[in-house]
Amino acid sequence: MNFARRDALATRLLAAFDEGAPLAPITADDPSFDVAAAYEVLAEIDRRRRERGWQAVGRKIGFTNRGLWARYDVDRPMCAQVWRETLVDAPSGAASFALDRAREPRIEPEVVFGLRRALPSGADARTVLAAVEWIAPGFEIVDSPFPGWKFRAPDCTAAFGLHRALVVGPRLALDERRRDEFATRLPSFVLTLRRDGAPVEEGVGRNVLDSPALALGHLAQLLATQRAMPPLAAGELVTTGTLTDAWPVRAGETWTSDYDDLGVAGISLRFS
């Protein structure tokens, strides 16, 4: 991809995020636009955000739920930065979020990890969790600039994984005993997502690349293939992908998550 094309796409995608403007899928006009080119555009977007003073605090990995691939016309997970400017900490388990700039926002209940050290790639769940300092519930707010959520994998990759915000609930510190327990529980726990108190959908841990811990390990492998992106490091947080479908949200609604017997408290999030 030439620099002029990369820079023009970065400008269009940032304007869509900042202004809530619609954007035709890039692949509709350019079928040759692929995931490798998308990561080049994403690297330029990251560079511009840092120039604006944005601070990277972690990563998101999207489309780890294989059950959603056909629906959204994607064929692989992808990753993007989480920023201080898109992070909402909810240590009490309750938060609010304004949808004033969002175009077609949706909510995704996820498992979030905080890293205490660099993460090895290709590791099993227990080895991955040895690098984890804490675990928390999360709601990622995703927003497609592509009308009707119609896109392909390169489109959503370039559009920073459709990431608008990440709400992180109470953080539970992990010790060696808890790491053993979570390695076992993460694939099988059941999450319940509710809107205004009514159940909307249930999702199981194995929906996320067989376990959120394995999704974290997959991210380490994915980053190893992206020269423009640094490897995971101590102090970063990582949200590992939605356990359910991504559900449309509206102002006035309150959404809650229940992590069943996982040992993690849920979140209550009100939209305004």
Image: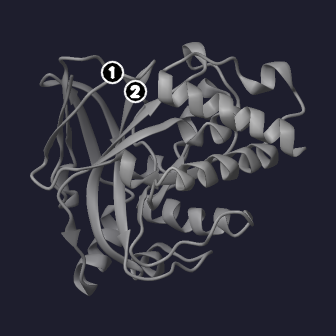
Q: Disc 2 marks which amino acid?
A: Arg
The residue sitting at the front extreme is 52
Among the two numbered marks 2 and 1 on one chain, the one whose residue lies closer to the N terminus = 1
Q: Is residue 102 above or below residue 56?
A: above
**Most foreground residue, 41 or 192:** 41
* Residue at 14%, 22% in the rendered image: 196
Q: Give residue 158's quadrant in the image.
A: top right
The residue pinned by badge 1 equals 100
The percent coordinates of residue 238 (x first, y second) are 43, 60
Q: Quadrant of residue 96?
A: top left
* The one of 167 and 64 positioned closer to us in this rendering: 167
Does 268 sit above or below residue 183? above
* Amino acid beneath label 1: Asp
Provide residue 8's location: percent of width, then percent of height.
Answer: 76, 33
Q: Quadrant of the N terminus?
A: top right
Residue at image coords 76%, 26%:
26
For residue 176, the mark is none
Q: Is residue 32 left or right of residue 231?
A: right
Above or below, 129 against 226 in this view is: below
Closer mark to the observer between disc 2 and disc 1: 1
| Residue count near mark 1 (Cα–Cα under 10 Å), binned few <14, some 14–19, many ≥20 | few
Instruction: Name the residue carrying label 2.
Output: 106
Give the quadrant of the C terminus. Answer: top left
User: How far separated are the C-alphas under marks 2 and 1?
Assistant: 13 Å
Residue 34 x/y as whole percent: 82, 40
